[in-house]
Image (spheres, coloured by chain):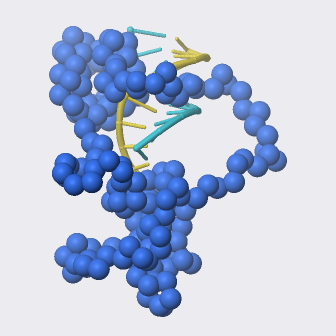
Chain colours: A blue, B yellow, C cyan
Amino acid sequence: MMDAGPGWTNERVELLKRLWSDGHSASQIAAEIGGVSRNAVIGKVHRLGLAGRVTKPNGAQAASGRRPRAEAESPGASVAPTVLAPAPPALALIQPTSVPSAVALPESSRVTIMELRDFMCRWPMGDPSTPDFRFCGDRAITGLPYCTHHSRIAYQPAAERKRDRKVVGFR
DNA sequence: CCCTGATTCGC
DNA sequence: GCGAATCAGG
């Protein structure tokens, strides 16, 4: 008599609530509960009214939802051209004068410009005029030219002159 | 390429 | 009510 499909029993819902309020992500909760997908968790969370963990002050909500089953996209139409980074690190001028490569980056996936892919971090490393000039090449944040590490450096908020040395944006 | 939550809609 | 598909953003 195995239950074919354990729906959202009271215990599961309570576990969901506990994990959600405990700060676990939807995918983590889904993996913890088992048998449910991340979407299922999110959907249930919203249905329970628990959503609203991250509320945007602006009226700009999130996605507009899923498409109404229509896919008449213009195949020939080209989208907007690729936009470059708003504030590149001025090439190698901001070079890591004291980069403990032997400690910090044991094996950074540095790549040449030829090996640089779209999803790779474009953070310059080394002197562009030398043959050993490479880019970080690490996995870049989607939509951004840099990886998580270098994004923090490139997009540092201009309001942190001295004190407050905490890392930006993190739950 | 990874991830996060939000939303819609067919079931 | 449920959750996959999709979207938007990091």
Q: Closest to the observer: A138 or A91?
A: A91
Figure quadrant of the C terminus of chain A:
top left
Q: Residue at x 34, y 19 (%)?
A: A51
Q: Is residue A141 visible?
A: yes
Furthest toward the front, the residue is A161
Q: Residue at x 27, y 54 (%)?
A: A161
Occupied quadrant, residue A140: bottom left
Occupied quadrant, residue A2: top left
Figure quadrant of the N terminus of chain A:
top left
Residue A66 image position (x, y, % from top left): 58, 26
Q: Horizontal placement of C5 versus C3: left or right?
A: right
Position above or below: A32 against A89: above
Q: Residue at x 40, y 82 (%)?
A: A126
Position above or below: A81 against A95: above
Q: Horizontal placement of A102 versus B9: left or right?
A: left
Residue A156 image position (x, y, % from top left): 36, 53
Number of numbered discs on residues? 0
Q: Horizontal placement of A118 versus A39: left or right?
A: right
Position above or below: A85 against A107: above
Position above or below: C9 against A148: above
Q: Residue at x 67, y 25 (%)?
A: A69
Q: Is residue A31 visible?
A: no
Furthest toward the bottom, the residue is A131
Q: Closest to the observer: A103 or A20?
A: A103
Residue A166 image position (x, y, % from top left): 20, 49
Q: Horizontal placement of A90 versus A166: left or right?
A: right
